Image: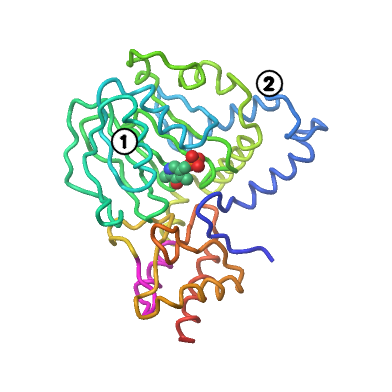
């Protein structure tokens, strides 16, 4: 039985992506070779790379002056690569969760870091507002979706300085005003592809402003100049990413994905809000439409483990909450069918009726 996959990452991919990838593992582009065994310098793979970069630009309506690169190292490498390349003296960061915190820690290795606001004291249950970003920073770093805590900034903040964003877990779930950003990065394994590749969108004029020597592999310019082929790129994840991008385009682009995502999230949040047993963990106005975090009310708390097994028997997997929040987390990434959300909601209702 195909499961209802609510894992936070690696996570569900579109059936289209999985089928096309499986086909290419047997025969890639009619070459009589598997995608697993072809040269990244073959013209067939070059075509994959070119189309993937072009589709990212098209889907996110990326203006002139930006480059799209596919790198290794995960989003976590970007935590240091961003300040290495962009932080000359001082940067501002918004502390909205574990990933934001890790980014802050790395930035401190390269210069002054102004953490303009944090919701840490409240276990990151909301996105801080009314903070001041100093005018003299090189950039303001945000984490648009806090995968662990289930909060999200579904907007591109209005500040006087350039933005940098970790969009690992909500890229392609809404249109973005890319012109506000110097750099956007996203590990692939939530809304794009199998783990192993990181998507980076960078404004070329933002580069070259730091004095320090940047090691070749950690310099964005290296990868821009070589079209993400300075060394062997993650061939298979990039191939899969292309399939997902084609699927998004076929579905009607990021606006269409957003509409679907909003519908799916509304179904689950409505069920939580109308439940006697379950309750959400985050501020309503900051709720993520990608990762929905909820727990059982104190009087039912001891039933949490039982609900996980109850759901599992219906093919629902991956809903156990992260240890720093507890309870449940249902990840509703782009590829998750609405039907899976309906199955989860039905399980919640049936479980509640039995207790
Ligand atoms: C998953 C995730 C990361 C970590 O990504 P890696 O590719 O494992 O380094 C960073 N930021 C956010 C928001 C994430 O969801």
Rendered location of residue 257, percent (x, y): 47, 51
Q: Is residue 307 above or below residue 61?
A: below
Q: Which is nearer the eye, 250 or 216?
A: 216
Residue 41's disc number: 2
Q: Is mark 2 within 8 Å of ligand 1?
A: no
Residue furthest to the right in view is 32
Rendered location of residue 174, percent (x, y): 40, 46
Q: What residue is disc 1 on?
A: 141
Q: Residue shown at 57%/64% (left/top)? A: 317
Q: Secondary structure at mark 1?
A: strand
Q: Secondary structure at mark 2?
A: loop
Give the residues drawn in magenta, as a range: 264-280
Left or right: where 30 falls relative to 228: right
Q: Is residue 266 magenta?
A: yes
* Cα distance between the residues tagged 2 and 1: 35 Å
Q: Residue shown at 53%/29% (left/top)? A: 71
Rendered location of residue 299, percent (x, y): 35, 80
């Amino acid at each position: 039985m195909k499961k209802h996959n609510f894992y936070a990452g690696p996570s569900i991919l579109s059936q289209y992506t999985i089928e096309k990838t499986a086909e290419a593992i047997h025969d890639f582009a009619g070459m009589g070779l598997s995608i697993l065994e072809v040269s990244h310098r073959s013209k067939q793979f070059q075509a994959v790379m070119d189309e993937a970069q072009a589709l990212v630009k098209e889907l996110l309506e990326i203006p002139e002056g930006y480059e799209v690169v596919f790198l290794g190292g995960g989003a976590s490498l970007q935590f240091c690569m961003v300040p290495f390349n962009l932080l000359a003296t001082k940067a501002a960061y918004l502390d909205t969760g574990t990933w934001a915190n890790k980014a802050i820690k790395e930035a401190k290795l390269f210069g002054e870091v102004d953490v303009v606001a944090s919701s840490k004291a409240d276990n990151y249950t909301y996105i801080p507002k009314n903070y001041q970003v100093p005018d003299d920073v090189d950039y303001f770093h945000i984490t648009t979706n806090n995968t662990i805590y289930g909060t999200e900034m579904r907007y591109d903040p209005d500040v006087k300085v350039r933005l940098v964003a970790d969009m690992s877990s909500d890229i392609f779930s809404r249109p973005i005003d890319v012109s506000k950003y110097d750099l956007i990065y996203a590990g692939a394994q939530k809304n794009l592809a199998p783990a192993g590749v990181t998507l980076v969108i960078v404004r070329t004029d933002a580069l070259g402003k730091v004095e320090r020597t940047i090691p070749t592999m950690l310099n964005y310019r290296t990868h821009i100049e070589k079209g993400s082929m300075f060394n062997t790129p993650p061939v298979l994840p990039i191939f899969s990413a292309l399939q997902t991008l084609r699927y998004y385009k076929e579905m009607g682009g990021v606006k269409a994905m957003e509409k679907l995502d909003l519908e799916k999230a509304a179904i689950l949040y409505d069920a939580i809000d109308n439940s006697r047993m379950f309750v959400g963990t985050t501020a309503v106005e900051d709720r993520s439409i990608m990762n929905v975090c909820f727990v059982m009310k104190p009087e039912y708390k001891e039933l949490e483990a039982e609900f996980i097994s109850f759901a599992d028997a219906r093919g629902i997997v991956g809903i156990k909450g992260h240890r720093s929040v507890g309870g449940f987390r249902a990840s509703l990434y782009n590829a998750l069918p609405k039907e899976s959300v309906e199955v989860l909601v039905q399980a919640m209702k049936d479980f509640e009726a039995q207790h």
